[in-house]
Amino acid sequence: MNRLQRSSINMLSSAAGYVVPMLVNLVTTPLLLHALGDVGFGLQSLVAVVAGYMMLMDMGLDLPITKLLAEDRARQDAHAENHLLSTTLQLYTVIGLAGMVVIVAMSAWLAQSVFQIPADLIDQAVLVFRLAGIGFLGSVGLSWGRAVAMGLQRFDLTYSVSVVLSTAGTLIGLGAVYAGYGVVGYVLIRTIFTILAGPIYFLLARRLLPSFRFQLGIDRATLRRVSGYLGYGTFNRITSSLVSRLDQTLIGIWLGVAAAGIYAVPFMLVSSLGYMLAYMLGFIFPMVSELQSLGQMDRLRDIFLRASQFIAALAGLIFIPLFMLGEPFLVIWTPTIAGQATGVLRLLAVAGYVGTLTATLTNSVVVGLGKMRQFTIYSTIRAVALGSFCFVFIRMLGLEGAGWALLVTCIVDVVYFVIVLHHYLHIALWQLLRVAYLKPMLLGIGFAGVVLLLRPFATSWLGLGVVGVVLGLVYLVAGFATGVFGETEKRAIVGLFQAVRKMG
């Protein structure tokens, strides 16, 4: 399989890995809201918040696993692969057990003293937070497995596991809610499927790497290899864990659990789309490591420019309709909270668009080049800015303050983007704007006009679906006609079909 075919499959797999769970969430969210109520829905949304804070304990191990495994594969060093996977798996196990103990021990305090939870739900909240601790143990296994699959550039397997487990957990969990087990039953089912991820990924690693044999004990040489990442990775995890969910945490503390649930709906929608775009080009990270080890920096710059145009085009296709059709979509999807969530959705959509253009590829390149110190400086500054803006804007503006905080923080992303272009890729900003961003942005302006014309028809699921299909076709046809999509995309599609046919 050549590089273009492999990249095409990785992009499609990454997109599917986020699109399918997102569609499942679109269907199940209004059902969960109806069955659990605003408070119950908000409570289950805080599970990810609580577990997310403990992710600081993993020290950012996923990054060196992906980078070093890609390098080991390029050098065909099976001995190094074995030690890397065995050592990091044991480290992740210790981290998962420690995090589980911490969360379980803090459950009563979180339910009784931190979040504004009604008295009649305190006991259920304690159980939910304890389950979050057990789920954290499963999530570290998920992190290890994803990092391994990404290092092998097998994104198809990575997201196949994610899609199946996430979809099954959500649907069966919803069944548990309607069977009368409430929010505890829903979180329990989701936790069980999260725990299954670790063993499944371990078996896949054995299959993909026939020479892999788990070795008990920590290999010192491997520790030295990853040690350069652990200090920065730990710091990155601390800052990101403390701040990434700060918006929802402050809303839960200041405005109540119900408000946190309302905010979770537009946040889930925008973040799912943003992560989908980011992970569609996630293969750039291991590819950068591979090209750097082979000294092919000119090839890397060429790939970056092409990928920048592609991601800019996709960002316009997704975030422009989301901004302009967000209100009618929420009215149809979640009518009980649409009035409170629309303003936040629009702000998050703009922030998602800017962040996609400036940070999506940039982060993959910087980490792939091994510039962890520079990445840590950026992420720390961004975390401090976001945390400060959250404290200020949420207090002043409520729910919409969280959206403003994320949008204003994009200033940090823009500055970081310009620095990386100049210092590490040696690409002039004007060159990138002219070669990669000009056509997609002009296409986006015209596309916004078409969306505005069709907006009156998006008043039902049928109308919204027809409008979505028409907009997609118009955008793709205009994209190929104006050169936004070109021969590379055509060859990628052909290569994808050829690769899939061979696998079949």
Image (tube, rainbow, N blue to C red):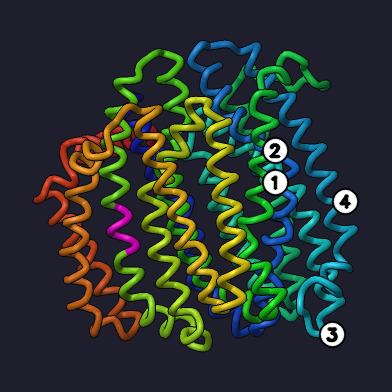
Disc 4: which residue: 101
Kind of residue sitting beneath label 4: Val
Kind of residue sitting beneath label 2: Thr
* CB within 8 Å, label 1 to label 2: yes
- The answer to whether residue 57 is visible is yes
**In terms of secondary structure, where does tag 2 sit?**
helix
**In terms of secondary structure, where does tag 1 sit?**
helix
Q: Identify the residue shown where x is 24% and y is 74%.
A: 467
Q: Position of residue 44 (x, y in %)?
A: 69, 70
Q: Would residue 255 appear left or right of 411 to someone viewing this image?
A: right
Disc 1: which residue: 238
Question: Which quarter of the figure has residue 12?
Answer: top left
Q: Nearer the viewer, residue 330 or 241?
A: 241
**In terms of secondary structure, where does tag 4 sit?**
helix
- The first of marks 4 and 3 along the sequence is 4
Kind of residue sitting beneath label 1: Ile
Mark 1–mark 4 distance (CA, rounded to whole Å) = 18 Å
Vertical order, 163 against 108 (above or below): above
* CB within 8 Å, label 1 to label 4: no
Disc 3: which residue: 119
**In terms of secondary structure, where does tag 3 sit?**
helix
Mark 1–mark 2 distance (CA, rounded to whole Å) = 6 Å
- The first of marks 3 and 2 along the sequence is 3
Residue segment shown in magenta: 314-319
Disc 2: which residue: 234
Q: Identify the residue shown where x is 66% and y is 18%.
A: 225
Kind of residue sitting beneath label 3: Ala
Residue farthest along the left direction in this orientation? 481
Mark 4–mark 2 distance (CA, rounded to whole Å) = 19 Å
Magenta span main SS = helix
